[in-house]
Image (cartoon, rainbow, N blue to C red):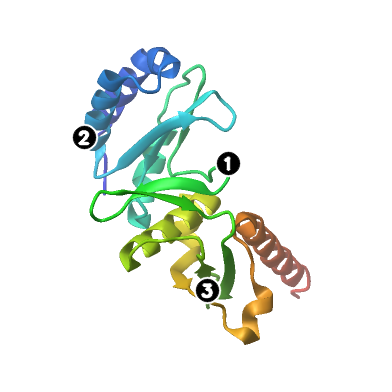
Amino acid sequence: MSISQTRLRAFWDWFASVAAELGANLEDAKILAELDARVRSLGDLVWEVGPGIVESNALTISPSGRPEWLAVTTAIVNAAPDCDGWEFHPAKPPKDFDLRFTFEDRHGRPVDVDASGWQYMLLELPGGAFDIVVRTPSLTADEDGTQLATEIAVECVVGERRMMEYIHEVIVADEFEPEIADARSSLRFLADHLTSLFKEAADADKGRNRHRP
């Protein structure tokens, strides 16, 4: 997949021209409609604006959970100009939130979700990826809605990039198997858990490299 450099330059020239105005009102319908059209002209991508992590505002241009599009969104963001008060992401970053959110089910109905009491377990797979088993006791939705809500919650906690790179499957469970139930933890700790596992793996690799003849 490639991207037109002419469209890419036009996109960022336009965004730089409206960045201050959009930053002052992230709900400006006219600018958001134009933003949507211009992002779609770059590829089959999605986007979101909101508060930034370091800067006041953030624009995320997302591959929508498809790893094959991450190189495209990365190239787009790498071409971004400096815009005062803005930061840019090529995938949805982790959310700093209380694990409460609303989503639309397959019928377009809003469903309020409180995942603050959910628990998870990681099942490591060959190659460093994981299946994650999540218990969702507070959720009242049909099977499809429950699966979607659980995937949204996991992505919000770990961020889209880690979701694509390291989470193979999200499994919803009524209960954990007794023999592995002691390994469960609160969903809010998932990102820190993954970080610690990656650090342990990196430290182990360094140790092996030091001892090679």
Say which residue appears at 52% left-offset and 68% top-offset: 134
Q: Marks 1/3: CA distance?
A: 29 Å
Which residue lies under the disc numbered 3? Answer: 127
Which residue lies under the disc numbered 1? Answer: 96
Which amino acid, mark 2? Ser
Residue 29: quarter of image: top left
Say which residue appears at 27% left-offset and 34% top-offset: 39
Q: Nearer the viewer, mark 1 or mark 3?
A: 1
Res. 41 mark: 2
In the structure shown, which secondary structural element does the residue marked by tag 2 occupy? helix
Q: Is residue 133 above or below residue 161?
A: below
Residue 57 is situated, as x and y percent measured from the top left of the image, at: 49, 25
Q: Badge 1, how many Cα within 10 Å: few under 14, some, many 20+?
A: few
Which amino acid, mark 1? Asp
Q: Nearer the viewer, residue 81 or 52?
A: 52
Q: Badge 2, how many Cα within 10 Å: few under 14, some, many 20+?
A: some
The reply to whether callout 1 and callout 3 are in contact (CB within 8 Å) is no
Which amino acid, mark 3? Gly
Counting residues from the start of the chain, the first of labels 2 and 3 encountered is 2
Residue 179: quarter of image: bottom right
Residue 4 is situated, as x and y percent measured from the top left of the image, at: 24, 35
